[in-house]
Image (tube, grey):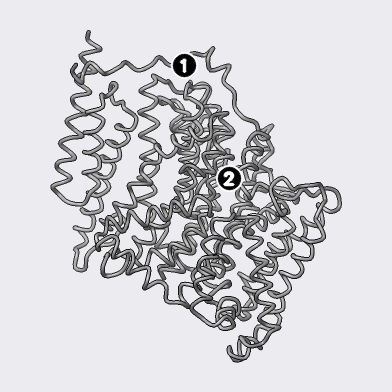
Amino acid sequence: MSFWKKEKEAPPPVSGAEVDVQETGSAADVEEVMKKYDRESNIRVWEGWQKWVVKFLFIGVSLYCLYLTLWDTSLPEFRLASFVGLIVVIGYLNFPIRKGSVKVNSMPWYDIIIMIAGSFPFFYFAANASVIKTTSSVAISRDPFMLALAVMGTLAMIELCRRSVGIPILCVVGVLLIYAFSQLRAGALIYDLFYTTLGLIGTPISACQKFIVVFIIFGAFLERTGISNFFINLANCVAGSSSGGPAKVAVISSALCGMVSGSSVGNTVTTGSVTIPMMKKTGYQGEFAGAVEAAASTGGQIMPPIMGAAAFLMSEFTGYPYPTIALLAVLPALLYFTGIFIAVHLEAKKLGLKGIPKSQLPRFSKLAPKLYLLLPLIILVVLVSTGSNTMAYSAALATIITIVVGLINIVVNKAIHSEDTSDNISFMKVLDALEAGARGTITVAVACSMAGLVAGCITTTGLASKLLRAIVSVSGGVAIIALFLTMLCCIVLGMGVPTTANYCIMAATCAPILTSEQIGVPMIAAHFFVFYFGIVADITPPVALAAYAGSAIAKSPPMKTAFNATKLAIAAFVVPYIFALNPAMLFQFEAGTSAAMKVVQSVLIVVTSLAGLFGVAAALNGYLYRPMNPLFRFLIAAGGLCMMIPGPFTDVVGVVVVVGIVLFQRMGAKKNAAA
């Protein structure tokens, strides 16, 4: 039997009757699924006057963090210790001892004791920061009281990490602590990890306090201006009427919303509640609809300008200014979303799906009056890119502009007689945003503190050099093998660790190995590499939180949704290898390269990468102009991968294979149509 006879016609599109019986999950369904898998969704329930006490405490923490970031000029040890102390307080007020252990207005006596005993060491450290800093490290490391405080504070943070982040990162921390204690004197190690900026209050927690908190608060305010709905409507204007329009709307709107939230799960729930029902109504299967939203929402963390919290940490680790990192991230992010866009387009063609009738889509003329919603983002980008102010000041100013935009909403909604006033600002929304900012900071700060312990153990013991020798020995100094091993580490660790902590750990362990002389990956490319693979863990089975959130809305099997999301996000698994092996994608060129050649190299790598992604996406989907047989799927995948490998020979081979198969498919489709 020939390969050509194995081809099958595309299945007919889903009928309206079939679509009507398809169900989508409610907010309660999403909450149930997330409580099962996501620790951040398992929080205490406060009602009545207790709710207001807790609410104002959270608001006070946000305001204090803004004060520390914008105006405080005290010692770093004071700022960081007081910040972590407050995180301990609100962390234990927010997270119960285990999943499901939630009663209204209930906080057991032992949690109150742990909260007080755990926060006291940090507040004591903050109050005596100047004295502790000038006291001999030997004296402190031999003082039983000071050592007891350090142990008590560290254990409280470890327990809070177990509650809010999970056990996997604690396994890493535990192994490294055991190793560190076996190598160094206990007192000296405890001093380094608690009382210096080399451990628990090290670079990660410093970046969290200086930058991340302010941007989390900014995102909370921006979400309350109705910008998410605006982005969804804008995406509908652009792509809603095209083939399989709702899926393309999901990709575009998630990319735009991701610039604001920087949260895979949050973005999935926000935009997915609108886009997933639309996709199912159009004819996409539930597991595919949930996967599209999860894959696109996960990309929000790599989409400038905010890029989630890890981008600020990357600036701290690499020394590159944040605006530079945001600029370097543009091309990889566009390739990522383009890859998903291609995949959903091919799926729509395969299923014969249509778009949304134009009569049912919002008109741009009606959206134009609300273009001012983009003003906070525009101002933020301008301020950050020009470097005229600090990042924290820029985010704070953008937050004020967001409040102004919310006030403008009131006037505009009245002028256009809009019945929907949900995007109007109010005093309660300001309070809610401040509360959400503090609540959203807990997990990030806890993860950063644990990452600081990891980095501290590696630094104080000199473990980095031993890891380098081990990786070089296993990989034989071959870059692609070292990259593959690093990818596995990132994905496995990322399955149970937030992006921020994952990046911090990998930046302290694997990134220096990749940048060593033996491997030779440029520093910024190495950091982007571990950053990307830490993010895709959110859609990689078996622990794929963004995919699980999407499956809850789509009423689809979680694991099927996760596998579909992984397939759709294939670009996230390929693009990091491209810029690691060919840093021109990150605008990193060899010394002496002329400006003209820089442009040529950048354009060439983008064009070949896009063509390569198209080939790989077509192979995974099994459809171009008509279904493809297994041989052609294998060949077009190989051709696509060839174009992603740096070098003129592989580019030529890839172009010949991919273009040849595309032309053959097109001619075959025309013959079938003529017949």
Left or right: 371 as drawn, with respect to 464: right
Question: In terms of depth relative to the viewer, which is nearer, 469 or 264?
Answer: 469
Which callout, 1 or 2, points at the residue further toward the start of the chain?
1
Image coords of residue 488 (percent x, y): 39, 52
Image quarter of the N terminus: top left
Residue neighbourhood size for the residue with mark 2, other residues' Cα within 10 Å, grouped as few (<14), some (14–19), many (≥20): some
Residue 674: quadrant of the picture? top left
The answer to whether residue 143 is above or below residue 440 is below
Image coords of residue 378 (percent x, y): 50, 53
Residue occupying the far top of the picture:
675
Image coords of residue 225 (percent x, y): 63, 46
Asked which secondary structure carries label 2, the reply is helix
The answer to whether residue 461 is above or below residue 253 is below
User: Can you see residue 400?
Assistant: no
Image coords of residue 377 (percent x, y): 52, 52
Kindly identify the amino acid type of the residue bearing the numbered disc 2: Gly
Image quarter of the C terminus: top left
Could you say which disc has been placed on residue 266 in the image? 2
Could you say which disc has been placed on residue 297 in the image? none
Residue occupying the far right of the picture:
49
Kindly identify the amino acid type of the residue bearing the numbered disc 1: Val
- Residue under numbered circle 1: 14
Residue at screen point 63% across, 50% down: 40
Residue at screen point 19% across, 26% down: 663
Question: In terms of depth relative to the viewer, which is nearer, 13 or 577?
Answer: 577
Left or right: 235 as drawn, with respect to 424: left
User: Can you see residue 628?
Assistant: yes
Asked which secondary structure carries label 1, the reply is loop
Spatial separation of the CA atoms under disc 1 and disc 2: 30 Å
